Image (tube, rainbow, N blue to C red):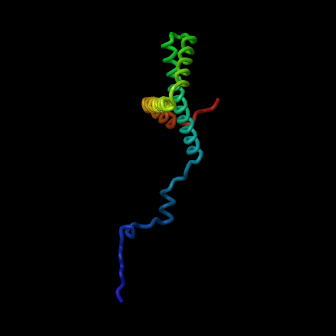
């Protein structure tokens, strides 16, 4: 009777022994991991919220600038826009809403890409700081 014996690349890899795996393995610092995760989440949330607030506030700034910082002129133009929107055809309303959504996404993405390098530098600096003493 003939025995078929095969050796694969996986068979040639030495299996770790209990002593070797314990010696090479460093314990996980769960406190530092949790603190770092919380810091990243807080910083990322702040970055996202500030980016969205900047994008939402920019049109108000532009409209106020165009109205000469006059609120009556601003609200008159907004009323005019609202009246045109109310009397527009449904397909025109849909296209207008779609254009606003696309513009918002482009403005948000563009501003986020512009602010991202500074955010990553600040995050790296904060993560590399040591524990700060509490007074």
Instruction: Name which residue lies at 48% across and 57% down.
Output: 24
**111 or 17: nearer the viewer:** 111
The x and y percentages for residue 14 are 41, 67
Image: 115 above or below 16: above
From the viewer's side, name the closer residue of 48 and 30. Answer: 48
Displayed quadrant of residue 36:
top right
Residue 49 image-quadrant placement: top right
Asked if one can make out residue 109 in the rendered structure from this viewpoint, the answer is yes
For image coordinates 35% across by 76% down, the residue present is 6
- In this view of the protein, can residue 121 be seen by the observer? no
Report whether 8 appears left or right of 123: left
**Residue at left offset 52%, top offset 33%:** 48
**Image quadrant where one finds the N terminus:** bottom left
View extreme (bottom): residue: 1
> Against 4, is 79 above or below?
above
Question: How far from the left and from the top, in percent, is residue 71?
Answer: 57, 12
Q: Position of residue 94 (x, y in %)?
A: 50, 32
Q: Quadrant of residue 15?
A: bottom left
Q: Position of residue 99 (x, y in %)?
A: 46, 30
């Amino acid at each position: 009777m003939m025995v078929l014996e095969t050796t694969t690349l996986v068979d040639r890899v030495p299996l770790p022994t209990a002593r070797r795996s314990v010696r090479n393995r460093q314990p996980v610092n769960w406190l530092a991991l949790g603190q770092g995760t919380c810091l990243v989440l807080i910083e990322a949330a702040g970055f996202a919220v500030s980016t969205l607030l900047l994008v939402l506030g920019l049109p108000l700034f532009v409209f106020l600038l165009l109205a000469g910082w006059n609120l009556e002129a601003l609200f008159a133009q907004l009323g005019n826009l609202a009246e045109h929107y109310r009397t527009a055809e449904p397909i025109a309303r849909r296209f207008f809403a779609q254009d606003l959504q696309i513009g918002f996404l482009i403005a948000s993405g563009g501003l986020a890409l512009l602010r991202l390098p500074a955010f990553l530098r600040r995050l790296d600096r904060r993560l590399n700081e040591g524990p700060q003493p509490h007074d």
